[in-house]
Amino acid sequence: MELRYNKSRDDLGLLWQDRAVLELLLQAKSRSMIAEQLEMPFGSVNTSCNRIYKTLDCHSLPELILKCSQLEQFSSVV
């Protein structure tokens, strides 16, 4: 899958793989569901989640959802 090899970053500074994981997190998907849907190892999903929380300076899922709800590019997801 091309997500694993694309090292480009979006306007938030997230890798495209992390962005895909974030969009599924915001849809209330579990990490295991995300791994299955994106065909990624579970450990890679956890690594992406850690990068997302660090990059967006969040410490919990509710905080992440709140922060993303305030960003225009996620208004249709949250």
Image (tube, rainbow, N blue to C red):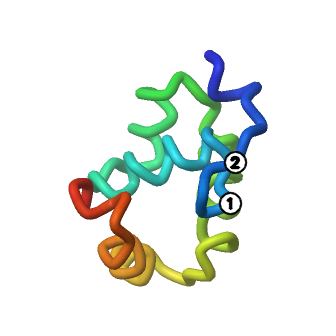
Q: Which mark is residue 75?
A: none
Q: Is residue 45 above or below residue 60?
A: above
- Dots 1, 2 in contact, CB < 8 A: yes
Q: Is residue 69 above or below residue 6?
A: below
- Image point (39%, 54%), residue name: 25
Mark 1 crowdedness (10 Å alpha carbons): few <14, some 14-19, many ≥20 = few
Amino acid of disc 1: Gly
Q: Residue furthest top?
A: 1
- Image point (47%, 48%), residue name: 31
Relative to 36, is 7 on the left or the right? Answer: right
Q: Which mark is residue 13?
A: 1
* Quadrant (top left/top right/bottom left/bottom right) for the C terminus: bottom left
Relative to 76, is 13 on the left or the right? Answer: right
Q: Quadrant of residue 13?
A: bottom right
- Image point (60%, 29%), residue name: 40
Near-viewer residue (44 or 71): 71
Amino acid of disc 2: Arg
Secondary structure of the residue carrying numbered label 2: loop
Q: Quadrant of residue 51?
A: bottom right
Q: Quadrant of residue 4?
A: top right
| Residue 42 percent across, percent down from the top left | 60, 39
Relative to 4, is 31 on the left or the right? Answer: left
Near-viewer residue (48 or 7): 7
| CA–CA distance in space, label 1 to label 2 | 5 Å
Relative to 29, is 37 on the left or the right? Answer: right
| Residue 73 percent across, percent down from the top left | 37, 58
- Image point (61%, 41%), residue name: 16
Which residue corresponds to mark 2? 9
Secondary structure of the residue carrying numbered label 1: loop
